[in-house]
Structures are given as C-alpha cells and as structure tokens.
Image: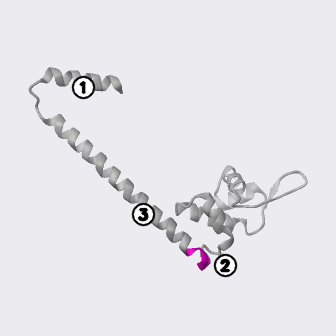
Amino acid sequence: MKIGELSRETGVAVRLLRYYEAQGLLTSHRSDGGHRHYDPEAPATVARIRTLLAAGLPTKVIRELMPCFVGNGTELQACVLDHLRTQYAELDSRIADLTRARTALGDILEASARALTHVQTGRHASQSRDRACAEQR
C-alpha cells in the first residue's frame, strides 16, 4: 500500500507517517520510482504507535517497544512491563509537579485579586504602580 492509502486508512497525515518512518517506528519499501510502499500490517503498526503516543510515551521509548507486541493488539510482552511501570511513575511525578505549580499560581492570582479589592489610602502611589506594570506588558 502507498503512503496516501495508509494515510486515508489510518487517518494519520502523510507528514506524520514520514516522521514515524524517520524515527524508526514504521518501515516501508521503496519502489523503483522511489515511492514508499507499506506492508499490509502497517495500519496496525500505526494504530499501535498512536496508542503509545496517546499514553505519553516518547518516540525513543516507542521504538524500543515496537518489537515487543503480542498478537495484533496493543498488548506487550511481560519483559517490558517494568519499563512501562517506570514511565507510569514518571508521569505521576510530572503530574504532581504540575499540580504544585498550578496551586502556587492559583495562590498568586488569589492574593493579587484580594489586593486589588482593598481600598488603599495612597491611591496615587497605587496608580503609579499600575501604570508601570501596564507599561512592562
């Protein structure tokens, strides 16, 4: 099957299919005219790639996992489960970091909003600060 056919069948842009190939995730054979031709299992391979990308795995990890699939689905051999668990733990860590950052930003926004609602006695100084802040943006 040609790249356009694979694109239509999988719903993945031709440009992305070329990228998957450049990353070593997908293979093709070249015709005498230089056109890419894919094996009949290419749509299943693309589906696997998309599933692993949706799971947040980088292409380097996906390349390592591609030979480890069992059958036609997205199940992987037991020998890679520890690797997947490590990726899962790293996602948990990143989520925790982002949650802390979101909380800190929310605290800053809340404190700033509270400060704006208080009537300040030195209104001229406050207006000066507001003007300086607006000029910096």
Secondary structure of residue under mark 2: loop
Going 17% across and 36% down the picture, which residue do you hit?
115
Q: In the rendered structure, which amino acid carries the disc numbered 3?
A: Asp
Secondary structure of residue under mark 3: helix
Q: In which quarter of the image is residue 109?
A: top left
Nearer mark to the viewer, of 2 and 3:
3
Q: Quadrant of residue 21?
A: bottom right
Q: Quadrant of the N terminus?
A: bottom right
- Magenta-drawn segment: 76-81
> Tag 2: Cα neighbours inside 10 Å, few (<14), some, or many (≥20)?
few
In terms of sequence position, does the residue under pointer 1 or pointer 2 come before the other?
2
Q: In the rendered structure, which amino acid carries the disc numbered 2?
A: Gly
Q: In x, y percent, where is residue 121?
A: 8, 26
Q: In the rendered structure, which amino acid carries the disc numbered 1?
A: Asp
Q: Disc 2 to disc 3, how far (Cα)?
A: 29 Å
Q: Which SS does the magenta portion mostly show? A: helix
Residue under label 2: 71
Q: Disc 1 to disc 3, how far (Cα)?
A: 40 Å
Q: In which quarter of the image is residue 58?
A: bottom right
Q: In which quarter of the image is the C terminus?
A: top left
Residue under label 1: 130
Going 38% across and 54% down the picture, which residue do you hit?
98
Residue under label 3: 92
Q: In x, y percent, where is residue 60?
A: 63, 59
Residue 49 forms part of the magenta stretch? no
The one nearer the camera, 21 or 43, is 21
